[in-house]
Image (cartoon, helix red, strand yellow):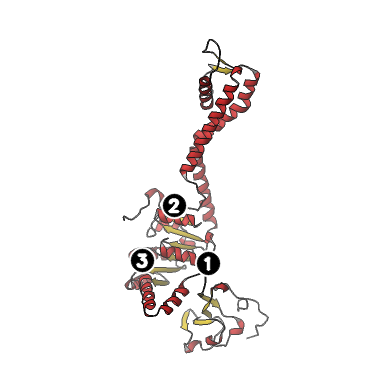
Amino acid sequence: MPEQTTPESTIGRIRLPANTRSPWWELGRRILAALAILVFTVLLVYFDSKGYVDNSDPKNEVSLVDAIYYTTVTLSTTGYGDIAPATQQARLVNAFVITPLRIAFLVLLIGTTIEVLATQGREKFRASRWRKHMDDHVVVIGYGTKGRSAVDTLLTNGLAKESIIIVDPSNAALGEAHSDGLAVVTGDATRREVLVRAGVAQARQVIITTDRDDSTVLATLNVRFLNPDAYVVAAVREQNNVQPVRQSGADSVITSSDAVGRLLGLSSLSPTLGSVMEDLLTYGDGLEVAERDLLVPEVGKSPQSLPDQVIAVVRDGQVHRYFDPVVTQLARGDRLVVVRPAQELPWAPRPGTHGEEDTSETND
């Protein structure tokens, strides 16, 4: 299947999610409304035909055909004058009924153009307002399977949809992201101007999930050029490409093919172990892996003695396994990587950390 491309005119364009209807539904609705106005006006004129005169008819009679003719020319123009209202009643009906119907009919005729112009103006306004308020957000490059899973994880753990923007050149990804309520910048992330439009320079985190490892390297270089401080997570297909992506500026690199292969191997050797690993990688129920702050009462204790199942300790930016002698006693400032039940909302903060006021905290 050939790769989908994005027209040059739409590259880098910000697309904000919106509730849209089918164009066929909109067209059908307009046609039905126009026909309803025509039919109603024809009947109105025909039933009051004695109030009209036909200057081209010696008998001055208005037939059904004359009513149709009068309606079409009156609704689309100001009329030709060959058929005209003669009585006060017919003139009042023309002034207060047919004239508003004429306006409604003309609006329907040019409604498509008006709607396009209004939509474009509204879209520009929304994009301008989005840029003004977008700061410290998360940029996800690529909205395939990996990108969608990453976004689902962020949303599950409390990040607002308004804080996420997708960068992808595919029209299919554009539709899926919009259906998920996410803003999209269409374009290739290896082009720096596309990343600028996505606000990468102000982003807090960037997640890169392109389909090609060479594109991942180039996208990482551009992201790091625009934002030296953002935390960059990248996915690669091959283990051999981990180091080039790290050297390009990624803080964390995940090897997708090796991870899937290892999970398949574990499931083959031990179905039970494979089920547990799948549970840890699946959000919503069962077990979850999370990182949390150390609580004040936990200072000085060993990782094994805590109620949570601690699997690693983060100290001074370094990750230590729970059995490492360096972290035999937990110290202030440590962060814990734990396994928790999903029902506890694992990433939700718990009260009683050193960053909060706590009555149990003693003087050091």
Q: What amino acid type is highlighted by mark number 2?
A: Arg
Find residue 37 and report its horizontal and vertical position in percent: 55, 31
Query: What residue is shown at x 48% (from left), y 39% (from top)?
Result: 28
Residue 204 appears in the figure: no
Question: Mark 3: few, some, or many residues within 10 Å (few <14, many ≥20)?
Answer: many
Instruction: Quarter of the image for the N terminus: give it.
Output: bottom left
Residue 181 location in percent, x, y? 51, 56
For the residues marked 1 and 3, what is the alpha-carbon distance in whole angstroms?
28 Å
- Total count of labels: 3
Which residue was labeled with disc 2? Answer: 13
Q: Is residue 311 left or right of residue 212?
A: right
The numbered mark, 3 or 2, whose residue comes first in the sequence reads 2
Q: State how far apart marks 3 and 2 are (Cα).
A: 23 Å
- Of circles 1 and 3, the one toward us is 1
Q: Quadrant of residue 174?
A: bottom left
The residue that disc 3 covers is: 217
The local crowd at label 2, few if under 14, some if 14 to 19, many if 20 or more residues have their Cα within 10 Å, is: some
Instruction: Report how far apart the C-alphas of labels 2 and 1 lie in the structure.
Output: 28 Å
Q: Which residue is mark 1?
A: 156
Which type of secondary structure does the marked residue at label 1 adopt? helix
Q: Position of residue 269 (x, y in %)?
A: 37, 80
Amino acid residing under circle 3: Val
> Disc 1 residue type?
Thr
Crowd rating for badge 1 (residues with CA inside 10 Å; few <14, some 14–19, many 20+): some
Residue at (51, 36) in percent of width and height: 32
Give whichever of 88, 3 is nearer the camera: 88
